[in-house]
Amino acid sequence: MDKNISSRDGTLLAYESAGRGTPIVLVSGAMSTGATLAPLAAPLSERFRVVVYDRRGRGASGDTAPYAVEREVEDLAALIDAVGGEAALYGVSSGGALALRAAASGLPLRHVAVYETPFAMSAEDLAERARYTEELTAALAEGRRGEAVELFLRLTGLGEAVIEGARQSPMWAAMESMAPSLAYDDAVMGDGDVPRELLSEIGVPVLSIAGEASPAWMREAARAIAESVPRGTYRALGGQTHMVEPDVLAPVLADFFKG
């Protein structure tokens, strides 16, 4: 990241941009930084000015206590102001929830696209989210960062053998360093239910996307978002999972954003 701006509370945010035209801000999900979205930014930058940034508490960006979702919305407001005063947003996973909250807050946006924002679609899933929040809060309060990461990986559906393999990998130390930001993504997701009332306040066009190879509940959640937004559209991408291929996603986003 080669640029910095100051958010409303003084937190320094690291970002970079490439390309020309309408600004598109890419919002990463849990356990990721702006660099995670670089493979998607590259093809989009051929048609737009694409901005990637490290959300507060991760990467090269700073952090300021106490955390509140509103501070992350203010971070996006500062970025949008820095790149011309109006932009479109794309958010992946829990980053999609942040993008939707930013849109509902009235930020100067043209379009919002989200990919597989993981809202719960059953009472059982909501109960699981509640347990996750309770256990994550306790683990982070007691400094058990490794356990916090494990809790998140289990929530995503990874098995114990895969989690143990991750623990033994060179990436584990970096994952533990980012563990406190898991609480931020958890807060952005709210109680895990589709925030239909909040979504009904979004006035800009919203494209909610899912992969056809993802679990059915992911597609149901994506469709529920589109149905809850006054100007919402649902799109399923053939053969794609939660780890969507940038070369498949980029043309879909470009067609939507150019409108």
Image (cartoon, rainbow, N blue to C red):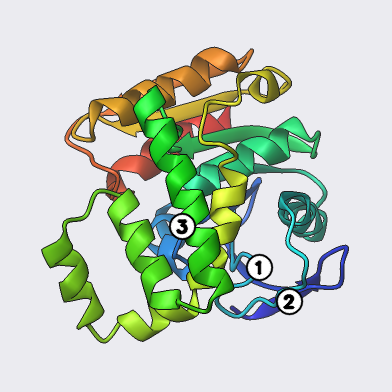
Q: Which mark is residue 56?
A: 1
Q: Residues within 10 Å of mark 1 (few under 14, many from 20)?
A: many
Residue at 46% x, 70% y: name it: 35
Between circles 2 and 1, the one closer to the viewer is: 1
Q: Which label sits in the foreground, 3 or 1?
A: 3
Amino acid type of disc 3?
A: Glu
- Choose between 170 and 78: the one closer to the eye: 170
Q: Residue at x 44, y 41 (%)?
A: 129
Determine crowd level at label 3: few under 14, some 14-19, many 20+ residues with C-alpha closer than 10 A.
some
Q: Is residue 21 visible?
A: yes
Read off the residue under disc 2. 4
Q: Nearer the viewer, residue 84 or 36?
A: 36
Farthest residue, direction left: 161
- The crowding category of the residue bearing disc 2, from other C-alpha atoms within 10 Å (few below 14, some 14 to 19, many at least 20), is some
Identified at 42% across, 26% down, the residue is 222
Nearer-the-camera pick, 88 or 259: 88
The image quadrant that residue 128 belongs to is top left
Residue 7 falls in image quadrant? bottom right
Residue matched to label 3: 135
Badge 2 amino acid: Asn
Disc 2 from disc 3: Cα separation = 34 Å
Front position among marks 2 and 3: 3
Check disc 1 and give the amino acid type: Arg
Q: CA distance from mark 3 to mark 1?
A: 22 Å
Whole-percent x and y of residue 88?
Answer: 64, 41
**Is tag 2's residue or tag 1's residue first in the polypeptide sequence?**
2
